Image (cartoon, rainbow, N blue to C red):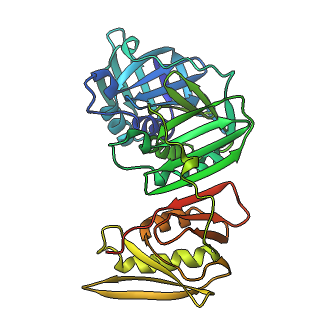
Amino acid sequence: MEFLIDKECFNKAISDVNKAVSLKTPFPILTGIKITAFDNCLILVGSNSDIVIERVIPLSVDAVKVLEVNKVGSIVISAKYLSEIVKKLPDKIHLKVNEERLVTIQSNEIVTNLRGFNAEEYPRLPQIDEVKHIEIASVELIDIIKQTVFAVSKSESRPVLTGINMTFKENQLTCVATNSQRLALRELAIDSNLEGSFTVPGTSLNELIKLINNEPGVVQIVVIDNYMVFKSNSISLFLRLIEGNYPNISALLPNHSKTIVTLNTNQLLKGIDRACLFASEWKNNNIFLEIQDGSKIRISSNSSEIGKIEEIQTINTISGETNLSISLDGSFLMDALKVIKEEEIRVSFGGPMRPILIEPVNNSLYLHLISPVRSY
């Protein structure tokens, strides 16, 4: 195998696939990056047990030649040393592999030799059946993940709650995340011939966001074996699905409310942010909401050692009971409000010990549910 490649292009691709490589694996070959040279492109693969990242480098990028393949072939090279070497080289990189799998990396007068692994021993990727798939704009995919992933559980005691549940049916994608104390749900209309419900690890989806953030266009989603595959023009991610049944969240959503108010999203977010200054003393970052005079909402928090903070905000509209106070986790509230793009939200209260429902006004495809916390 032999090729000549632009240093920056190679470095970026190595950095991308390196996110999937684990140095703690018991399989030495998985500490490496698999590089395969074809006549028309270079493909890099990094993998661990949960995520596989595949990066394609074409011969030209934006009509500028970045790759010249002199001899096709495949090799696995230590991710740690390949990454550090390429990062520190000054110019175009000439990489060559001989029959004994000795890798020579040269840039100008700098020459490095590394021992490679046999590429035949590297785990094969599942074959993608593209008949059943969906296509979604990368911008929309990033939005729907960002608006739900923060609500996944950080505890491994219930693994299925550490992922986003993605349900495909009747040309609709529904994403749900919950940690039992809060829930985020987002729906999106899509063209789809894929049906089913799958739970994808939240940590893996955060990596997906980073990798496709600068990838305009469409992402193809395919489910195969135990993986959900996200594929764009130059990058593919194979994310291992979480086994187990996801909770039936429809039973959690309230069907009636005692009080419904509408508030300015950004104004409320800033008020909660200020109140959180004194909420850290509490186990659940308690902030207190109280309706006053049927037209205003009081936001407050206190610390026995530092002091207290409170402010009054105007309620845009209110219906139902006007005598209400509730204690909530301020950080949960902020997480929800930060990802709502609409200017106005509707907050529905079922009582002091019932979860509150937060929805953007004029957008029924998105909601948050947050359970109250004890105020002592």
Q: Is residue 153 left or right of residue 127?
A: left
Residue 217 visible? The answer is yes
Instruction: Please determine whether, in this image, residue 1 is positioned above or below residue 111.
Output: above
Q: Look at 51% across and 14% down and name the residue there.
A: 72
Q: Is residue 39 left or right of residue 119?
A: right
The percent coordinates of residue 210 (x first, y second) are 50, 47
Residue 213 visible? The answer is no
Quarter location, residue 363: bottom right
The percent coordinates of residue 127 (x first, y second) are 55, 17
Count of labels shown?
A: 0
Q: Look at 50% across and 37% down and name the residue there.
A: 199
Instruction: Please determine whether, in this image, residue 37 is positioned above or below residue 183.
Output: above
In front: 1, or 77? 77
In front: 79, or 26? 26
Q: Quadrant of the C terminus?
A: bottom left
Instruction: Please determine whether, in this image, residue 82 is positioned above or below residue 292.
Output: above
The percent coordinates of residue 160 (x first, y second) are 43, 39
Quarter location, residue 79: top left
In front: 324, or 152? 324
Q: Look at 34% across and 25% down and name the residue there.
A: 30
Quarter location, residue 136: top right
Q: Look at 49% across and 88% down and name the residue there.
A: 311
Q: Quadrant of the N terminus?
A: top left
In front: 75, or 185? 185
- Outermost residue on the bottom side: it is 293
The percent coordinates of residue 155 (x first, y second) are 34, 48
